[in-house]
Image (tube, grey):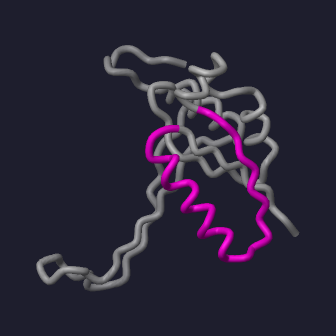
Amino acid sequence: MSHQIAVIEGDGIGQEVIPAAVEVLESLDLGLEFVAGDAGDAVKEATGEALPQETYDLAAESDATLFGAAGETAADVILPLRDAVDSFVNIRPAKAYPASTPSAPKPTSSFFARIPKASTRVMRTTSPTTCRR
């Protein structure tokens, strides 16, 4: 069974890490189908929209979305994408590995954590009293 993955590089580092992530996932031979979508600063400059409707629909219809990063248009990209995939929280796994340098502390036991990061529909701006929806 094939699963469709929406691939949205976005801006900045997303253009470097997302192709690498796709390459790793393809090497696993999981039968994943990768479909590219456009979003971000350059897309807004070219089309007038940071997140075109086609990309929103792609994310909404895919089994998963692999998203890189957003630049100045972050609020115009991230919040609608969260809505498209019905996301209310990001889960960020963290795992301790044996120290790679002699000066680093060595874990005394196995450690794995899942850290939820709120994904509300409100994005804070530079002023803590001002919010955008």
Q: Out of 79 and 74, give the one closest to the viewer.
A: 74
Where in the figure is residue 20, as x and y percent of width and height?
54, 62
Q: Out of 119 and 19, give the one closest to the viewer.
A: 19
Position above or below: 85 against 49: below
**Residue 33 within the magenta-colored segment of the rendering:** yes
- Range of the magenta residues? 11-39
Where in the figure is residue 60, as x and y percent of width and height?
77, 40
Position above or below: 132 against 42: above
**Going by the picture, which residue comes out furthest to the front?**
46
Where in the figure is residue 39, as x and y percent of width and height?
62, 33
Position above or below: 47 against 97: above
Q: Is residue 80 left or right of residue 104?
A: right
**Going by the picture, which residue comes out furthest to the right?**
1
Q: Out of 117 and 81, give the one closest to the viewer.
A: 81
Q: Residue at x 39, y 14 (%)?
A: 130
Where in the figure is residue 129, as x and y percent of width and height?
34, 15
Q: Residue at x 45, y 26 (%)?
A: 72
Q: Residue at x 62, y 61 (%)?
A: 22
